[in-house]
Image (tube, rainbow, N blue to C red):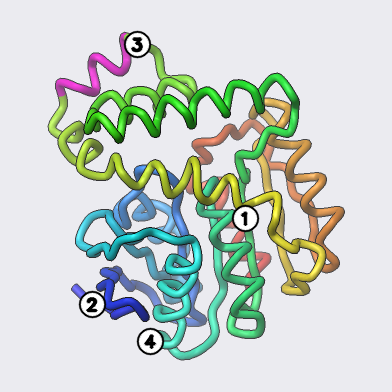
Amino acid sequence: MPKVTSQDGTRISYDKKGQGPTLILVLGALNKRGSGKKLAEQLEYHFTVVSYDRRGRGDSTNTEPYSVEKEVDDIGALIDKLGGSVYLYGRSSGGVLALLAAEKLCIKVIKLAVYEVPCNHYPEAQKVYRAYRKTLRQLFADDKRGDAVALFVKSVGVTDKQIAAIQRLPMWKGLKAMAPTLAYDTIELMERYPNVEIQKIGTPTLVMYGAASPAFMGDTAQKLSRTMPNAALCPLEKQMHEVKAEVLAPVLAKFFK
């Protein structure tokens, strides 16, 4: 599989399929590059679709200490390897990373699309998130990776019964291996999001959310689209955070063409 070396020596593994302008998929928490397979298959007739393992996941390596800037450098290294300019699609916390990449890399990102940046501004939700981050840090300090994964998936609506079932599957081992990256997504990136200079990102941007998702997802998307100088808002009917590839792909294809 192809790899690219980032500025700090981290090797980033990626898959590339299709033909046409290059579109990089920036995925969210506990996702490896294979998580973008269905979407890539829907888009490969229009674009050269690149899905990559973010640092610390799958076949990519990692170089401590972590920083958000290093993750942006990873995207920059991919862009340079792939021809110097791309389209970016970021989902969930990957949307925050994609915004940061557009902010830093400017003209290298021709167009940007994000789906459901998971930031809930409501005071009660912020209280819950602070407790979550405190608990997650303690679990990592105690090296309780499985408990950290369970805490995260429960926070996004997975029931205890479903968690118990997942723990019996082979995939649980892989999730535990990626557990440390939860700090990257749910702490580092989400704490950085309020400080992104969104109003300065002039990249043409499509901001999407699922119409069936919790209300805060739509509120965040609307605020984001109003603040960015060159953004359009697009709700996807009947969709939630786990958006269906067959619904999302035509919207992305229309926007990026």
Task: Determine the CA span between mark 2 and mark 1.
Answer: 25 Å
Q: Which mark is residue 160?
A: 3
**For marks 4 and 1 on the same chain, the one whose residue lies earlier in the sequence:** 4
**For marks 3 and 2 on the same chain, the one whose residue lies earlier in the sequence:** 2
Pinpoint residue 86: horizontal percent, then vertical percent.
54, 79
Residue positioned 48% across, 20% down in the render: 157
Pinpoint residue 96: horizontal percent, then vertical percent.
59, 54
Q: Secondary structure at mark 2?
A: loop
Q: Secondary structure at mark 1?
A: strand
Which segment is the magenta one? Answer: 161-168
**For marks 1 and 3 on the same chain, the one whose residue lies earlier in the sequence:** 1
Q: Amino acid at mark 3?
A: Asp
**3 vs 2, front mark:** 3
Q: Secondary structure at mark 3?
A: helix
Residue that label 1 marks: 114
Task: Determine the CA span between mark 4 and mark 2.
Answer: 10 Å
Task: Determine the CA span between mark 3 and mark 2.
Answer: 38 Å
Decide: marks 1, 3 in contact (CB < 8 A)? no
